[in-house]
């Protein structure tokens, strides 16, 4: 099998070289490609590039359907135009644009904290509509629909001509690209991606949601403002209508078609968005392009027909969309009139058929052809270290209750965990174990009772606060950071230490070899182990494991038992919910049994196993026996 | 009878006119609730469906068919389109548990908009309706027949669908699917068909809204985007999963819109409604009348 | 009547059901017994089409039903009364019951008469449901909800009932009541597959039983014999 050519290059290095070559070529283009029209297109592409790299931060990395970017672009444009009118210098005009978009953009992150998909999309859409209304109606300032005209000021002492301005835009695009790349590959960027995949897990592991969302929106909006300022200085004439719904749809087309979560994708999208309207005017070229797109969408259909399957919807639908676009490009009397419809068809084919966009498709093709030298991994160091022994008990729960509707999921439970102890929590289905952990870890606020973690009382119902007190947990239903690699999953959770320490955590769960694999590619058992490593990397004072062995194979369970035992040896106390009784018997110093929300027994594993109430909870009462329920005090063995 | 100051009468006139128009928003918003209940998705191109319904009605009436028949025809077209949107834009994305459906419904709406621009043209057109020309007078406030038709029609359709939901097995099955799709399957209900049915009814309601809004405003490609936003606002403020409050929210939005247009100038019509919407979302994400959501792990 | 061959199924991760074969004869009551997490519910879901099996085959009445959607399986007369009851909370008791008979009722016409006989039968069996027929199902107590769930399945006139954890979350007195109802159903000739974590009560009711541990059958045989077998206890508490 062909495994690709080995260039002996690291992917990052190769990408950097290609990127620099691209920019040199773009810079040199005006020397060969004369004419104002071409130069205008290139400038537009550079401006859209900045704008789309910004949009990708929220739509791609943060995964929020942000429909406000076009409006932020407009706000930036107007602010810098007004600054120029007021006599501001060139750099100040750019700054005005950035600030005018950054502030409202960062504020958009606030609804994103609480709203889910469609509601959030609506709130950004309302903001966008509102912005256009304000621009239209503040006639004394913006001249409303009549438009605002400015003359581009000179950059310091240099009066920029069209070519000079293009080069400036190119430099700014390069810088935006570069900074975005650094930012989004840093711990900050990883946190944003983690946030997208599981906000619950990021909160429980102390990766702040608010801060990261605000920063992502701020960065994306700042770029929108910069692009807006450049746009204003480029055209010298602004109208509010240009920043409405149509532009927003075009921008989404750009990001999705180019490929989310990639600066290359944003750039490719910008090129498409800038060129497409102009391509429509050249009918032969356009129908040629559409037919080649059409042929490409036929490939997956043919592939499934060859293997004698009926093509699935996601294989057939893009081809149908492209066929309609082809028909329009050939037979419509005026193709430009159908501009929006053709965009829509392209976008449809891209969203359904190319979920990773042009950049994603290109990258996966490239990886099939070329083998890159992987980044070296540092040697693994470090080991489990508890956050230090404190005098107070790692966990003290006093008379905790939590109800949902009329059901008392946790009913007056008091429990504590000693230093260096593993406490098992068992009970039949629906007995309230997971709710108990959810309350202790701060996902739910209790109705009554108190929780004390390592001597501090976290705010009720705050995952972050419970984390700060020293609690870390895993989840019964896995909450992986699917977009990150195993190593990155650890890195975002570490609050100190570098890569080699992260490798140390991976070594502990035997995932060293898979450090570079994405979580979406890891097996279920691996993910269960990775969740434990993630929790350990935060250096908890209390570790809560919610059914770690669920769905694991027998050899994995044996490994898990060894791991938990070694965590205990290192001095981290553990609360363990588990169905596998042999695991509980082997590991736990004490076992607490819950039934119907109540604690019914507490003692060593052997003791609770002999307890008649526990046996009854599991096996059911004998037919003759009458009910013994109703006592609220646990029977101590 | 109390004679009010002419200025107050004018304001009341504005509020009533807006409120009646707001019933149309409520009707489109009702369509959002139907699809959200069935499959947790809404059509971001619903405004385009309203517009298509209106144009379909115009064209049918243009062939000489009576008004009522063209309205019915438009509703059938709307139902087919609603079903189509669910099939091509929503089903796959929801199965994959991603939010691609938001983009896809926007995209399908955009295609619809472009088609309308090319088939019917970009200009606004009047919608022929057989309503008498005059207006009714209630204590000095006049209500035109087309405005009354909006309110009656919207209430009529909503009542009809609510009755169908209660008193036919198909309706009960749709409610069952929205409460628990798996349990509904166990009863022999094909949940996919139930979801398709909700989208078809939602599309028909949108198309009907187009045929009653048309005679009051005019019909043109620009009506779509604003309508989606307004109806969606109404649905979100009322709570996407609760029927109660929809009509109140619709009337309130329509009235506020008209009043702010009158007081602040026509360009500002929509601004206060949008600000209220953003505030409502920020303060009560589940909707003013909605139930609180419990986060699950 | 029901034959399961080497069925494998699971959600994510390892199979929760690892090659289970079982057989239920017409008119019998067979119990699946095991601790929670043993794979009983996964098995029940895979039988009834809520979960597509990863391997193995399911035959009902000699016809293969592996991988059919749940609505289709239900229409053939194999009906699951799911774990956790799953009644439609916002709907009334009566609407819940009518939904049980959904496949044979007209979708858009009057439907009450077509199912009124069955409805009366259910109300005779569970008089409390009749008293609360217009109440929202979500407002019923746990035991009443369980009876409603059983009643809903009976409305379908099933030829085979799968009951998944009918005792879950119920007080012992109520468990007894529910099992009394199941016993009388069985006495009237209904074929039943009962998945139950309370071994004692399940073994007392059933003719035959399979003891499930970690997704596999560890013991099978006549229920009376199993009730005395110490290995059953071991399947729970190790």
Image (tube, coloured by chain):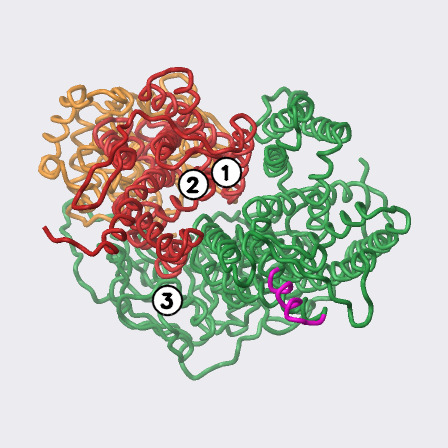
Label number found at residue A461 = 3
Q: Secondary structure at mark 2?
A: loop
User: Which quadrant of the figure has residue A382?
Assistant: bottom right
Magenta part of the chain = A78-89
Q: Nearer the viewer, residue A234 or A607?
A: A234
Label number found at residue B41 = 2
Chain B as rendered: colour: red
Q: Residue at (42%, 42%) from the top-left corner? A: B227
- Mark count: 3
| Image quadrant in which the C terminus of chain B is located | bottom left
Please indicate, yes or no, whether residue B297 appears anywhere in the rendered image.
no
Q: Chain of mark 3?
A: A
Chain A as rendered: colour: green
Disc 3 crowd rating (10 Å Cα; few below 14, some 14-19, many 20+) is some
Label number found at residue B105 = 1
Q: Nearer the viewer, residue B100 or C169?
A: B100
- Asked whether, in this view, residue A59 is left or right of residue A186, the answer is left
Same chain? Circles 1 and 3: no
Number of the front mark, 2 or 1: 1
Chain painted in orange in the figure = C
Q: Are marks 2 and 3 in contact (CB under 8 Å)?
A: no
Furthest residue toward right: A32
Q: Secondary structure at mark 1?
A: helix
**Measured from the top left, where is residue B64 in percent x and y?**
38, 15
- Asked whether, in this view, residue C200 is left or right of residue A488, the answer is left
Please indicate, yes or no, whether residue C141 appears anywhere in the rendered image.
yes
Number of the front mark, 1 or 3: 1
């Amino acid at each position: 099998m062909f495994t690709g050519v080995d260039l002996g290059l690291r992917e990052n290095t190769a990408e950097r070289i290609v990127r620099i070559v691209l920019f040199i070529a773009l810079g040199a283009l005006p020397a060969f490609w004369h004419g104002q029209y071409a130069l205008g297109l290139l400038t537009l592409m550079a401006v859209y590039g900045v704008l789309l790299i910004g949009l990708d931060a929220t739509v791609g990395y943060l995964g929020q359907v942000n429909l406000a970017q076009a409006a932020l672009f407009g706000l930036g444009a107007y602010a810098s135009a007004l600054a120029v009118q007021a006599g501001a210098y060139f750099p100040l005009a750019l700054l005005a644009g950035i600030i005018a978009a950054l502030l409202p953009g960062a504020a958009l992150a606030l609804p994103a904290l609480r709203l889910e998909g469609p509601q959030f999309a609506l709130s950004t859409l309302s903001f966008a509509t509102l912005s256009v209304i304000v621009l239209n109606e503040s006639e004394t300032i913006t001249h409303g629909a009549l438009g605002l005209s400015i003359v581009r000021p000179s950059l310091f002492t240099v009066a920029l001509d069209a070519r000079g301005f293009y080069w400036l835009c190119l430099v700014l695009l390069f810088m935006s690209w570069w900074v975005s790349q650094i930012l989004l590959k840093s711990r900050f960027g990883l946190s944003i991606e983690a946030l997208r995949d599981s906000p619950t897990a990021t909160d429980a592991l102390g990766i702040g949601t608010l801060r990261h969302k605000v920063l992502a929106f701020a960065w994306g909006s700042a770029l929108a403002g910069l692009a807006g300022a450049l746009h204003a200085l480029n055209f010298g004439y602004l109208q509010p209508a240009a920043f409405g719904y149509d532009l927003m749809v075009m921008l989404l087309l750009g990001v999705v078609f180019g490929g989310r979560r990639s600066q290359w994708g944003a750039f490719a999208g910008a090129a498409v968005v800038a060129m497409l309207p102009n391509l429509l005017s050249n009918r032969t070229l356009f129908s040629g392009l559409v037919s080649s797109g059409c042929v490409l969408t036929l490939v997956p259909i043919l592939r499934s027909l060859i293997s004698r399957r009926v093509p699935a919807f996601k294989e057939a639908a893009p081809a149908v969309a492209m066929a309609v676009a082809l028909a329009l490009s050939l037979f419509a009397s005026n193709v430009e009139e159908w501009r929006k419809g053709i965009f829509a068809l392209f976008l449809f084919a891209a969203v359904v058929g190319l979920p990773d966009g042009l950049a994603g498709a290109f990258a996966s093709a490239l990886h099939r052809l070329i083998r890159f030298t992987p980044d070296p991994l540092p040697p693994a160091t470090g080991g489990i270290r508890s956050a230090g022994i404190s005098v107070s008990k790692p966990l003290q729960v006093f008379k905790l209750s939590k109800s949902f509707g009329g059901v008392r999921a946790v009913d007056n439970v008091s429990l504590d965990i000693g230093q260096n102890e593993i406490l098992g929590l068992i009970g039949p289905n629906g007995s309230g174990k997971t709710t108990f952990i959810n309350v202790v870890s701060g996902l739910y606020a209790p109705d009554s009772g108190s929780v004390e973690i390592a001597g501090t009382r976290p705010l009720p119902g705050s995952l972050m606060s419970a984390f700060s007190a020293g609690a870390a947990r895993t989840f019964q239903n896995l909450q992986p950071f699917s977009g990150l690699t195993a190593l990155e999953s650890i890195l975002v959770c570490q609050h100190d230490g570098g890569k080699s320490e992260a490798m140390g955590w991976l070594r502990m769960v035997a995932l060293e070899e898979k450090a570079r694999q994405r979580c979406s590619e890891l097996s279920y058992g691996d993910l269960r182990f990775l969740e434990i490593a993630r929790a350990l990397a935060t250096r908890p004072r209390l570790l809560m494991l919610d059914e770690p062995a669920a769905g694991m194979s027998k050899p994995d369970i044996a490994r898990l038992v060894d791991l938990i035992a070694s965590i205990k040896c290192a001095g981290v106390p553990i609360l363990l919910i588990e169905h596998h009784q042999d695991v509980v018997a082997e590991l736990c110093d004490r076992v607490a049994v819950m039934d119907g929300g109540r604690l019914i027994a507490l003692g060593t594993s052997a003791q609770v196993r002999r307890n008649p109430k526990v046996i009854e909870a599991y096996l059911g009462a004998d037919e003759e026996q009458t009910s013994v329920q109703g006592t609220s005090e646990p029977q101590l063995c | 009878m109390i004679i009010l100051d002419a200025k107050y009468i004018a304001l009341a006139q504005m509020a009533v006119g807006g409120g009646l128009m707001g019933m149309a928003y409520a009707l489109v918003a009702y369509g959002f609730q139907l699809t959200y209940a069935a499959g947790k998705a809404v059509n971001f191109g619903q405004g385009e469906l309203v517009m298509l319904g209106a144009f379909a009605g115009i064209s049918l009436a243009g062939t000489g068919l009576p008004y009522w028949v063209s309205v019915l025809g438009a509703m059938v077209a709307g139902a087919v389109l609603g079903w189509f949107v669910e099939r091509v834009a929503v089903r796959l994305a929801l199965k994959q548990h991603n939010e691609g459906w938001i983009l896809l419904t926007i995209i399908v709406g955009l295609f619809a908009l472009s088609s309308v621009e090319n088939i019917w043209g970009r200009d606004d057109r009047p919608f022929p309706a057989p309503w008498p020309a005059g207006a009714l007078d209630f204590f000095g406030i006049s209500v035109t027949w087309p405005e009354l038709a909006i309110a009656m029609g919207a209430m009529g359709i909503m009542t009809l669908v609510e009755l169908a939901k209660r008193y036919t097995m198909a309706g009960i099955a749709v409610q069952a699917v929205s409460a628990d799709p798996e349990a509904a399957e166990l009863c022999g209900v094909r949940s996919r068909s139930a979801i398709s049915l909700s989208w078809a009814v939602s599309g028909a309601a949108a198309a009907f809204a187009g045929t009653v809004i048309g005679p009051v405003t005019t019909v043109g490609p620009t009506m779509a985007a604003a309508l989606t936003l307004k109806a969606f606002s109404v649905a979100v403020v009322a709570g996407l999963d609760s029927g109660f409050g929809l009509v109140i929210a619709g009337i309130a939005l329509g009235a506020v819109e008209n009043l702010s247009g009158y007081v602040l100038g026509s360009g500002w019509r929509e601004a206060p409604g949008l600000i209220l919407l953003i505030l409502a979302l920020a303060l009560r994400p589940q909707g003013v009348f909605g139930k609180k959501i419990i986060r699950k792990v | 009547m029901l034959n399961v061959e080497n069925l494998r199924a699971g959600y994510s991760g390892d199979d929760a059901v690892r090659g289970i074969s079982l057989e239920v004869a017409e008119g019998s009551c067979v119990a699946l017994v095991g601790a929670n997490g043993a794979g009983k519910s996964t098995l029940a879901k895979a039988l009834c089409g809520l979960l597509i099996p990863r391997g193995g085959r399911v035959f009902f009445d000699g016809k293969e039903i592996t991988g059919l959607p749940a609505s289709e399986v239900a229409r053939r007369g194999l009906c699951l009364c799911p774990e956790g009851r799953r009644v439609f909370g916002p709907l009334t008791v009566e609407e819940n019951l009518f939904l049980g008979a959904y496949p044979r009722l007209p979708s858009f016409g009057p439907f009450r008469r077509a199912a009124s006989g069955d409805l009366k039968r259910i109300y005779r069996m569970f008089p409390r449901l009749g008293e609360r027929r217009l109440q929202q199902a979500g407002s019923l107590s746990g035991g009443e909800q369980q009876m409603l769930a059983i009643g809903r399945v009976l409305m379908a006139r099933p030829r085979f009932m799968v009951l998944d954890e009918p005792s879950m979350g119920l007080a012992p007195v109520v468990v007894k009541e529910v099992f009394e109802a199941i016993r009388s159903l069985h006495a009237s000739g209904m074929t039943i597959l009962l998945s139950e974590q309370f071994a004692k009560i399940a073994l007392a009711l059933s003719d035959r039983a399979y003891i499930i541990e970690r997704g596999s059958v560890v013991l099978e045989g006549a229920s009376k014999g199993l009730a005395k077998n110490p290995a059953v206890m071991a399947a729970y508490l190790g």
